[in-house]
Image: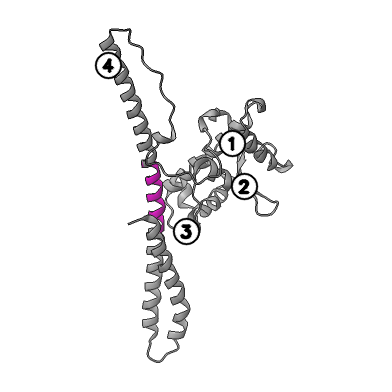
Amino acid sequence: MDTAKLGDILTGLSSICADLDPALSNVSTSSHWTDKDVLLISTGIQEIKAIVNDFRLFIDEAERNRQHLNKIKGRWLHLQNTTDLVLKTVEEQLKSGSKIVLPAARPEKKGDNVGMPAKTTTGPVLNVKEANSTEISQIRHLNEDEFSKIPNYMKGRLRLGEINSFIDKFNSTVIAKYGLLRKNRKTLTDGEKKRYNAYKALETNETTGCYFCTSDDMKDITGQKFVHSTWAMFTILRHCNRTKEIRGPKQIIRYCIVIATE
């Protein structure tokens, strides 16, 4: 089933649950319903809500896997095309008796990325490897002990692996951002200059000495999708003293890395 269609079904199921909640108070006043009946219905609704949450996590994970597989497919097709070109060139040179000279590797083109999903970000994805990650502060993964101490209302059905995977994306965003900021402005393309200026515009006296990023940065650089559980992970990182928030103006939130003192 298409994940978008399944998501619509779950949204409808959530809406049904929301409608049933206030109906319970009306049912409980009827002489035809006992307290036990009301309790059973209420329990059933809670179970349905739990199922909906589980399915949402499943959809998010399935979408991430789909994008990853499409990316691998695109890389494979590019490699296959390059290999075919090399074999054809070698074959022709062998037939002609000339010296074998391998063709230069072709850069990936749009046509080589068959099957890859269209990008939904407003700008190109930055190359994380452009920066030396050892010189830029990063967030440490959570361990089992830290995870167990997070309140249940905060982590919900999130698993430790999901949170640490989110941390990896956060770190990749920060590395790519500050890798760009460390470049010589004279060497930047027009697109890079635009991002450079946007990053600089968010710096304040309060951010001096801090490595930070915003949710928009994560969307642009890693393609991170933002759902309810994503915002919950930001809350968890703040709770576990991995980040702090610097807000304003308006709705802007900067997520700053808290340097470990251990």
Residue 83 magenta-drawn?
A: no
Q: Residues within 10 Å of mark 2 (few under 14, many from 20)?
A: some
Q: Look at the image and give the residue range highlighted in magenta.
A: 56-69
Q: Residues within 10 Å of mark 1 (few under 14, many from 20)?
A: many
Q: Is residue 10 visible?
A: yes
Q: Secondary structure at mark 1?
A: helix
Amino acid at dot 3: Asn
192 w.r.t. 88: above or below: below
Residue 65 magenta-drawn?
A: yes
- Distance CA(mark 2)–CA(mark 4): 61 Å
Q: Earlier in the sequence, mark 3 or mark 1?
A: 3
Amino acid at dot 4: Glu
- What's the magenta bit mostly, secondary-structure-wise? helix
Q: Toward the viewer: 213 or 50? A: 213
Q: Are the two marked residues, 3 and 4, in contact with CB atoms closer than 8 angstroms? A: no
216 w.r.t. 183: above or below: below
Q: Earlier in the sequence, mark 2 or mark 1?
A: 1
